[in-house]
Image (spheres, rainbow, N blue to C red):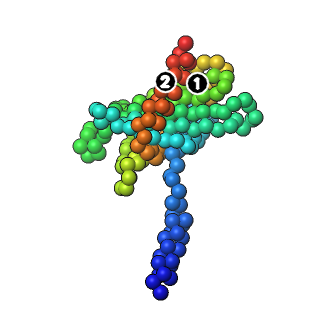
């Protein structure tokens, strides 16, 4: 009788987990390109890797990496890198809120075999630690990006861009530094 009750609880937990979508939540951003201001074009990016670290000053550094094969059969993968530096932690109800006072800098790069396009800007980021574990969910709001540099034959897809999204990041200082360094190396090559 005891074995059956345990099996029933396990089946119930398994059913609940499958119904609630117990898989790892995705880190997704939406970019709305205003390259043609009359016809904004949305793009969605889902990051397969997303991490963060907190530095000695208490600033948060979030990174994301997405790699996919081109849909048109082009050569080589397309890598998208995101770096968000949250340099001021807002305290709702205690901190003066002004629509022009941003709390994060953002860099976004599209890397192909033929070139690199790097976008930079500012926005608002609201981090929240998950109840269990060290993961942080960061909401990105009202971010505005512009083309910072372009090298090679990389297409300048976005122009003036708005960014929103949600990053579900695990604490991983090594991955955070790796992605930041990769983005900076691409940006340095693009600025020549």
40 relative position to 72: left or right: left
Which of the 4 quarters of the picture holds residue 2?
A: bottom left
**In the displayed structure, does residue 27 sit left or right of residue 125?**
right
Residue at x 29%, y 45% (from the top left corner): 92
Q: Could you tell whether 39 is left or right of 71 in the image? A: left
Residue at 43%, 45% (x, y): give it. Answer: 170
Query: Is 26 placed above or below 87 here?
Result: below
Q: Which residue is disc 2 drawn over?
A: 184
**Where's residue 19, x and y in %?**
54, 66
Q: Is mark 2 on a helix, strand or loop?
A: helix
**Comparing marks 1 and 2, which lies closer to the viewer?**
2
- Nearest the viewer among 63 and 104 is 63
**Label 1 sits on residue:** 117
Q: How far apart are marks 1 and 2 (CA)?
A: 12 Å
When the figure is inspected, residue 120 is found, relative to residue 175, above or below; the finding is: above
Q: Which of marks 1 and 2 is nearer the N terminus?
A: 1
Q: In the picture shown, does residue 189 fall above or below 162?
A: above
- Position of the C terminus, as image quadrant, is top right
The image shows residue 43 at horizontal and vertical percentages of 60, 39
- Which picture quadrant has residue 76? top right
Label 1, secondary structure: give it. Answer: strand
């Amino acid at each position: 009788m005891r074995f059956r009750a345990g099996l029933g609880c396990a089946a119930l937990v398994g059913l609940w987990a499958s119904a609630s979508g117990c898989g790892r939540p995705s880190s997704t951003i939406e970019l709305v390109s205003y390259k043609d201001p009359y016809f904004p074009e949305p793009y969605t990016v889902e990051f397969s890797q997303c991490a963060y670290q907190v530095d000695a000053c208490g600033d948060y550094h979030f990174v994301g990496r997405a790699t996919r094969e081109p849909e048109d059969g082009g050569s080589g993968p397309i890598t998208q890198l995101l770096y968000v530096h949250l340099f001021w932690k807002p305290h709702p109800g205690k901190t003066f809120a002004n629509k022009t006072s941003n709390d994060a800098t953002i860099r976004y790069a599209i890397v192909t075999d033929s070139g690199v396009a790097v976008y930079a800007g500012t926005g608002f980021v609201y981090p929240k630690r998950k109840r269990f574990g060290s993961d942080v969910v960061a909401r990105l709001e009202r971010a505005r990006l512009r083309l910072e540099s372009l090298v090679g034959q990389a297409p300048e897809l976005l122009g003036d861009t708005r960014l929103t999204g949600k990053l579900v990041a695990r604490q991983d200082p090594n991955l955070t530094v790796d992605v930041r360094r990769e983005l900076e190396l691409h940006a340095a090559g693009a600025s020549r």
